[in-house]
Amino acid sequence: MLALGLFILIVLLLVLFIVGLLIKFLLYLFKRFRGRNDVFATRGVKRGVLGMLIVIVFAIVLVFFTQLTASTPKIAKENSIAELREVHLNKSKEWISIRGENRDKPLLLFLAGGPGGSQLAATRYELAELEKNFVVVNWEQPGSGKSFSAISRKKLTPETYVKDGTALVRSLLKEFKQEKLYLVGESWGSALGIFMAKEQPELYQAFIGTGQMVAFEETEKIDYALAMKLAKENGDQKIVDTLRKNGEPPYYGNAVTTKSATYLNYLSQAMARNPEIQNAGFQTMRDLAAKEYGILDKVNYLRGILQTFNHVYPQLYDVDLRRDYSKLDIPVYFLLGKHDINAPLSLAEDYYKKLDAPSKEIVWFEHSGHNPWINERERFAEVVQQIAKKTK
């Protein structure tokens, strides 16, 4: 929280200095026009300009310092690995974290939600138990967090993520001298994982999807209708009015994120209030304050959620895994929260029935919503370890 508080303080100081300078300048002009152009007024303006420049320079230096010193906490084990690393993937510079108590353990690549979401810190906090039995790699996908500027937003497509993700996997397998790794994807990452597994199945030991996305446009329509129903039942007329004004998805243009957020946030709030769900919700402020993010990263953490989602998500409306990814050549596991109302369970179950894979299984989490890896993190880690034993 200290880093986030410092960032907010700097922004406030900058605002105060700029406002103060403007006030002094206006007073100077007022006095000048009234024939009171004395040297003290001029000196006051100069002092204000100098003060603002000092603060700006200090802020720039501080931003660079926090970017250069960002890191992931060390693990106090003899053969451990804990690195925050820039990697080159298809000519773009992106970031990953690598954490494990024993660098000789199997590799596990975690694909964050979004598109545009950054979960470097979240997975370190929530899935620390996995670091005992895996080398956990978290990929900052282009357009998110530390990789926000890796690729121009205009060039970001689902195919970009597949190509970069596959390049990362090949690089990791070569470095750690392993033949395959475990692929875990949550929400949008659960669809990306399917894309990657279909493209190069020989690289993966198994795929594990949670908060499993299946058909994007259908999901948005179901979510919109459910939010409207709940808002009417709860008497939340403001939400009802906003939903009506926005209209039914799919959305296009510059307001995709804000329009989608109306019903997605409302459903997330409903899950957070559900007494059956344990440990509900992300701890965004905690994650933003994490050592992995410099000040600029913290800003890009939020920009990724807003801007990257807005650009990439409409490109996914035509995706339906039941139609286009009905056969996979690796074991597939869906770890689903019983109370998930974000990614419709009916679609995940339907996809599971249609899916042809060497082996497949749905594991239900009775006290989870969209994020079993957060809601029931201890059991989630246990299930992933059990899957590893079955598929090694």
Image (cartoon, rainbow, N blue to C red):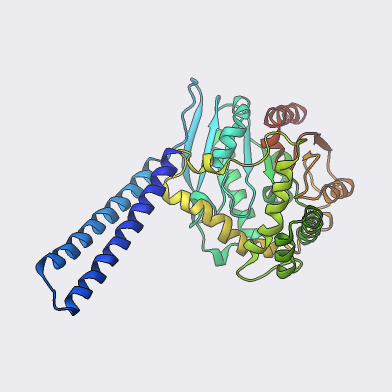
Q: Is residue 333 visible?
A: no
Q: Quadrant of the C terminus?
A: top right
Q: In front here: 264 or 156?
A: 264
Picture layout, residue 201 above or below residue 102: below
Residue at 59% x, 44% y is 170
Q: Is residue 168 visible?
A: yes
Picture layout, residue 125 above or below residue 259: above
Q: In front here: 22 or 368?
A: 22
Q: Quadrant of residue 17?
A: bottom left
Picture layout, residue 121 above or below residue 254: above
Q: Position of residue 343 (x, y in %)?
A: 76, 50
Q: Quadrant of residue 377?
A: top right
Q: Position of residue 215 (x, y in %)?
A: 79, 57
Q: Answer with left or right where residue 284 lies relative to residue 295.
A: right
Q: Position of residue 248 (x, y in %)?
A: 76, 67
The residue sitting at the right extreme is 353
Q: Answer with left or right where residue 32 lies relative to residue 69.
A: left
Q: Answer with left or right where residue 207 lies relative to residue 303.
A: right
Q: Position of residue 198 (x, y in %)?
A: 74, 50
Residue at 71% x, 33% y is 278
Residue at 48% x, 57% y is 149
The residue sitting at the top extreme is 78
